[in-house]
Amino acid sequence: MTPPNLAELTRAFTHIGLMSFGGPAAQIAVMHKELVEDRTWLSEDQFLRALSFCMLLPGPEAMQLCTYAGWRLRGTLGGLIAGLLFVLPGAAVMFALVLAYANWGNVPAIEALFLGIKATVVVVVLQALWRLGRKTLKRPLHWIIALMAFVALYLFGLPFPLVIVVAALFGALRATSETTATAPPAARSTATFSTIALWGALWAAPIALAFLLGADFLVDVGLFFSKLAVVSFGGAYAVLAYMAQAAVEAEGWISAGQMVDGLGLAETTPGPLILVTQFVGFMAGYNLAGAGLAFAAGLMTLWATFVPCFLWIFTAAPHVEWLTSQPRLDAALRAITAAIVGVIANLMLWFAMTVFFNQTRPIWDGLPGARPVLASVDLIAVGLCALSALLLTRLSLPLTLICMALAGFVSSLVFA
């Protein structure tokens, strides 16, 4: 069919961006309905092949799928429009929410609201773990990879990028003995290197400017989230484990409780869940020097998180047929996905201890792994978690979060 004009494309992707609540599965379903079913701009095969391609890449697969769809329909300009419209509405909402949180988050009434949200976040992460585990852990080897990733992070505190790299190498090496698929020839594109150079320069530009201006903190933020963009396989839940390890424990930018609150806020906004990185960058700047630095850090975070997505898509899009049929890439991705199950299990346990217990102790001296002090359990938080699990079987996630915020507030009045 005839490709849409820019006005039609903009209207369609504006609707997708505003309706993209509920995580990547729901967002991909919205895109499928809009682009495949209602407008028939993409065929079923094109859509599924694009989704497989985006799952090979680091970063938010739903945003990258949206960008790829725009690129396929109207080239680079179409990809830019689609990707930006998927991110910007949620980013604007997140700036408003995190500013309110920074100013009033320590008010007792607001803290009570967030207790209900935190309890819901634990359930949401547990659901994500269950869904991914059922889909991914189909062989004993995958269970072993997931367990080893969990042990590496929880007991030994090994860096998240190292876990991902080791899993990818292990999967790629095993592909030679397990897979014999023949791939089509790689596409040739003279624009590939110029695309890499252009988007690589755009990615580095604000970090270089901050360095020249002597803004060391912004340089640190840009480099941190740039590194995150390269290793962020497995979606926002997997990335949170790395952010928690680095931003909370190593850098001390934010507290563990603020990290959980950030995920709760990100769940309430349209757009990719990885907008939680914007919350982390903003709060890191706010905790250090107030609102001025916070907005600069939030913008730097957004840039370092999403500009790489455009780099990946615009560079690799002409090579989709070749990339999606590579046995080594496929095996590496499967191993990474199995490791992500262990990563999310570590995140879920960390969140649960943060929300349900007021004190933790080391499991063994000299190791970073922690265990809760059972006597410090917060029974109100446990009850709120059970209530949120029940509500999620009946209500949508945004509505459940609203109900649980109110339940947290009411519980603070009843049990004060």
Image (cartoon, rainbow, N blue to C red):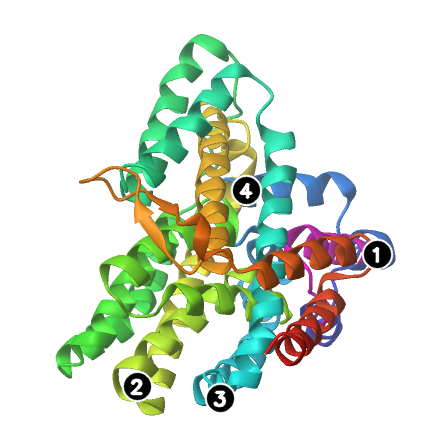
Residue highlighted by disc 1? 394
The picture places residue 135, in percent across and down from the top left corner, at 64, 31
Is there CB contact under 8 Å for labels 2 and 1? no
Using the numbered discs, state the Cα–Cα distance from disc 1 to disc 3 in whole angstroms: 31 Å
Q: Nearer the viewer, residue 400 or 184?
A: 400
Q: Secondary structure at mark 4?
A: helix
Q: Nearer the viewer, residue 158 or 111?
A: 111
Residue furthest out toward the right: 38
| Displayed quadrant of residue 160 | top left
Residue highlighted by disc 2? 293
- Relative side of 367 to 228, left or right: left
- Relative side of 271 to 403, left or right: left
Q: Nearer the viewer, mark 2 or mark 1?
A: 1
Disc 3 marks which amino acid? Answer: Trp
Residue 222's place in the image compared with 176, above or below, is below
- Relative side of 81 to 58, left or right: right
Pointer 2 or 1: first along the chain: 2
Pointer 1 or 3: first along the chain: 3
Pointer 3 or 2: first along the chain: 3
Using the numbered discs, state the Cα–Cα distance from disc 2 to disc 1 in whole angstroms: 41 Å
Is residue 59 visible to us here?
A: no
Q: What is the chief secondary structure element of the magenta stretch? A: helix
The quarter of the picture where the N terminus appears is: bottom right
Disc 4 marks which amino acid? Answer: Met
Pointer 4 or 3: first along the chain: 4
Where does the magenta region start and end? 18-33
